[in-house]
Amino acid sequence: MAMVKPANASGSVSTFIVYSMTVWGVTCTSADLAVFAACVTSVENANGQQGGCWVPPGSGREFCAFVGSEPGWAYPPTSLVCPANSTGTPATNPTTCTCSDPYVPDSTGTSCVLANYCPANMSGSPCACIPGGYVFISDEAGCVQEQFTISEPKDQTKIPDVEPGSTAEITVRVTSVQTSQPKQGAVVRFHIDADITSGGHDHGEENGRRPRGTISSDNCVAESGGTPDTYDCTTGPQGYTGFTFNAPDVSGTQTITATCISAACSGSITSNIDVKVGGLWPIPDSVYYSLTEDGSSKVIGSTTNHTSNHYLTSAASMKLWRLAADFYNYQVLNGVMTPTLLHLNDASLKWGGVFDLDADWDEPHAEHRRGTVIDVRANSSPGAIPDADFSAFKAMAKLLKVDPHFEGGSINQHFHLRLLNRKE
């Protein structure tokens, strides 16, 4: 490391040669022979004549000649000089000079520097970074206080989707800004929030607070101030920290923000994670069933709280279409002039998950979570399956391996169709 007191503590430093000569009134002086020669070459006398310095072939020595001077050749005159901040008598002792107090020789023994001189934020001999979190930058810059930041993940604004009630691993890394080395013991504060109108829930939180995801981790604790859904997590030996994110049963977008809160640590990253059942699609129109009331454009069962309530998987939609077609053809074969279309009520929300009829994030509407269950009207309202056809309808459903579960009282009774024969 530069600026360290060398072993030759005697204070001796080498002299150096200085070339100096006055040519036609111009003095050329330099410790660099090439610079000195260039100066001599550039000088002209009143007649435009120039001098010159060069190495004659085979001589191995630099000579200078001056037009009009006698003799025509001369060695460049030289003198011995002590470096700055040193004393000596080069004329009588042409090899060394002594550094003046408090200067000492540098590591090359050719110049004098202040004793115990260290760059910024360094001390000792040899120089070292002062205590308190300083790190070495370079010989010239010395040391600076080490800074840390969240380095991973980089620019991640979207975490892969996770299904309601499932888990995802959330991880960040803290490293040194100066050295890129991992920082152990840094504290990262995570906060989990939610878009309250996402996932098919068009209502707000008037009837209760929307569930946020929870965490599982051995290196995280709840934030000491009691801020809801906020956790402080400590980095390990490789600079990583994080937790297992436990998704709520309610679908929608959750937001996870990680902020480094330790001293000399900065950086924050916010990512969204969509809690959803993938592969759900709006139920397509069909001549065999009805999604709306006769003469109306309003989807059956749609409310301001849940306007997107008719979503199924492709496999479930195919089963529904097949069952509706079979029931329609059954009626035709039995002489019904105007066959009853199946009137479809709630299926699943567009991202699945809990279907909270009361807009309170709870589950009075059992199942309807994964796009495989739908309700079909079977009461006294227009478009309901006639009582006399209940047995035939159930038989057709079972042939297609659809579970025609019957629910409700006289007003709200309906077939709760488990289209893929699963309770979900």
Image (spheres, rainbow, N blue to C red):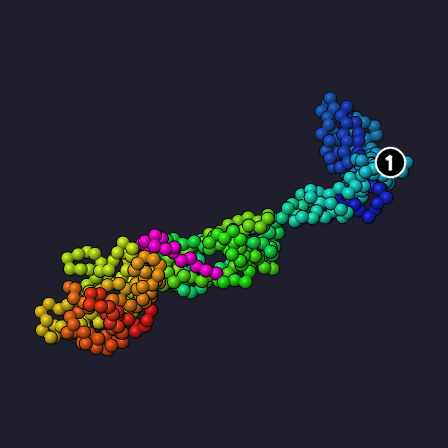
Q: Is residue 152 visible?
A: no
20 sits to left or right of 234: right
Please give the residue where the numbered disc 1 appears in the rendered image.
88
Residue sitting nearer the eye, 10 or 245: 245
Task: Indicate the quadrant where residue 314 lies.
Answer: bottom left
The C terminus appears in which quarter of the rendering?
bottom left
Q: Is residue 338 visible?
A: yes
Q: Position of residue 331 (x, y in %)?
A: 13, 72
Residue sitting nearer the eye, 76 or 209: 209
Instruction: Name the magenta segment's main secondary structure.
Output: loop
Asked if the magenta segment contains residue 202, the reply would be yes
Asked if the magenta segment contains residue 32, the reply would be no
Residue sitting nearer the eye, 138 or 269: 269
Q: Position of residue 131 (x, y in %)?
A: 69, 48
Given the image, on which type of amino acid does mark 1 rest?
Answer: Gly
Instruction: Identify the residue at the far top of this view.
Output: 46
Q: Position of residue 13 (x, y in %)?
A: 83, 41
Identity of the residue drawn at 53% across and 59% down: 220
Numbered range of the magenta stretch: 200-215
Identity of the residue drawn at 29% across and 60% down: 357
Q: Taking 369 as reference, is 91 above or below it? A: above
Identity of the residue drawn at 71% across and 29% down: 42
